[in-house]
Image (cartoon, rainbow, N blue to C red):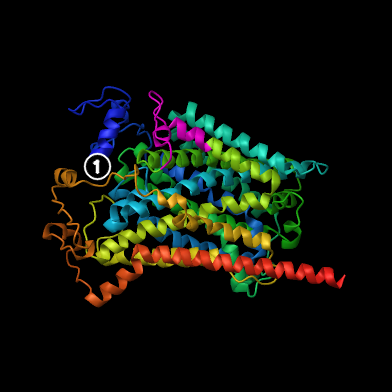
Amino acid sequence: MAHAAGLKHETEAFGISEGGYATKGLVEPKYMGTIADQKDMNVLGRVQVLRRNFRFVSIVGFGCTLISTWEVILTLLSAGLTDGGTAGLIWGFIIVSLGFTLVFASIAEMASMAPTSGGQYHWVSEFAPRRYQKFLSYITGWLCAMGWQCAIVSIAFLAGTIIQGLIVLNDSTYDFQRWHGTLFIIAITTFSILFNTFLAKNLPMVEGLILILHVIGLFAIIIPLWVLAPRNNPKAVFTEFNNGGGWNSPGTATLVGLSTTITSMIGYDCSVHMSEEIKDASRTLPKAMMASIGVNGVLGLIMIITLCFTMGDVNSILASPTGFPFIQIFYNTTNSYTAANTMTAILIVTLTASTITEVATASRQLWSFARDGGLPFSSFFSYVTPGWHIPLNSVMVSLAVTILLSLINIGSTVALQAIVSLTITSLMSAYILSIGCVVLQRIRGEPLPPRRWSLGSFVMLRWDFNHLQQIWDIELDGSMLFLPARGRMLLSSFCHDFSRSKTSSLKSSGLANRTEGSFQVSNLSMEVVEKYFGIPKTPVPTSIPSWEIPVPATLVKDFTGYKPLKPSALLWLRSIYHPATYLTYSLGLQAIIVIALLANAYESASSKLEGLTTA
């Protein structure tokens, strides 16, 4: 029914006759994609309203440009050096890269099953237990929407403050003002918005060019460093950890410092939200995602090792007046303002290009969520401008959100950083929910849709990937949300981590109450599955819990040769991967964070009061 309702809504909006012929608003035939694309759209109950002009190279460039791994490592270098040191950066990056490879391999497989711009919230609706589908899908949609909107601000903020740092390098009299940074954020985002409107048709070509700059720019930076900079001791680089943040142990400090490498490797699901603009998406998209991870992983590791060997004295670069240690490294190495400016300009260009792709991703995700009725004023957000074939309203809303968030920087940079840190937790939570639902499907022995890209030929291999991914996500998400407050831990810095947990509060807030009404994801209908895949989909009796429904023999072909688990093992695994477990986990984390925050505030206030009394 959801499929029929969604298809009816779009056929009315874009003038589709009962015979299936387009009368207005659809793209030209050359942008309709392959037969597989059209089949996927029909199965998902969608009409093709965006141009399919991305191919393998351009979507690889899209993913590499948006994540900008080696660029982000440079900009966030101070956090990793302070907590973890050079050894923490190198080994932490390797571990994080391997962990996120598991995450995005699982997401790539789901993207091949259902290549839709909705991404995670659609997959949750498809694979979650029937009684939780609508609620969990709605939560996941909001997590992704908030995460990607905040991501625009974060990358524009980095580009803007780097410009300010460059000004400081060249003019020591420059007064570093927060409102200057806000203006830079607005200017960079406005440029990205204009590009995503007037030049949207050329975005695939530009992404290919930026991919070239992304690779060449790395070598343009590391070659001068290797040639001119002095070398640090290899043993110290690979074995010495730093605890500059005053944590209770080097291990805890290294865990805190992982924020640098996590930020540089999270978000490869960006390509998923462009899936309705990719030609032959069910095959091209997963391959491009894995290629993007491989390219950025290698480039990021090269940059980290280069920096660790050529940065010189750590304390001096951390004290740089520019606010960015890498700018000081460039100048110390070349002893030339021109060279340092040129090397830094490469980062500014690539980060601006990253903002362009962030806007594209965030607007498509917002548009798709509104298309399914997940947002207030959904008809406005889901409108696609005829002739332009872009969700113009969603693009402009992304600009408005960015401007509003950037104004926070005028009052407090810490507050802005706390808000944009929602990006990490929001996306990680969405990964946990979507992949957890697939794991639950496999544990129950329920069928999954056909896909053209898979994790492996053996079912147990896919189980191992999914299970390892869940362990990685939950451990990382939990450890980054709360850590023991020791040493020089300040309330303001703790608020940064606390704000990350705010996303989970939506699960019990007013936003989550909109589970009844117009929100409805168009799941695979019985008629469509039978028509396009030749597989009958058995109706689910409402009186029988979904996990007790027998699986038809025709649907077990994906599990050929797999020996079912014992009932006791199934019961245990179901309890672990049950959606209610995830909600309990998130709410429990939130309660712990609140208690820790209050305790930290009390301790801070007590120490200040004691100081005043002594004085």
Quadrant where the C terminus is found in the figure? bottom right
Please name the residue shown 38% across and 37% down the image: 54
Residue 197 rendering spot, x and y as whole percentages: 48, 29
Is 414 in front, or is 105? Answer: 414
Is 295 in front, or is 450? Answer: 450
Question: In the rendered image, which residue does mark 1 sit on?
Answer: 3
Residue 84 rendering spot, x and y as whole percentages: 62, 67
Residue 231 rendering spot, x and y as whole percentages: 68, 61
The magenta-colored residue range is 375-398
Quadrant where the N terminus is found in the figure? top left
Looking at the picture, which amino acid does disc 1 mark?
Answer: His
Is 111 in front, or is 500? Answer: 500
Is 65 in front, or is 367? Answer: 367
Q: Is residue 84 visible?
A: no
Q: Residue 390: say if magenta.
A: yes
Instruction: Identify the secondary structure beneath mark 1.
Output: helix
Left or right side of 263 for 388: left
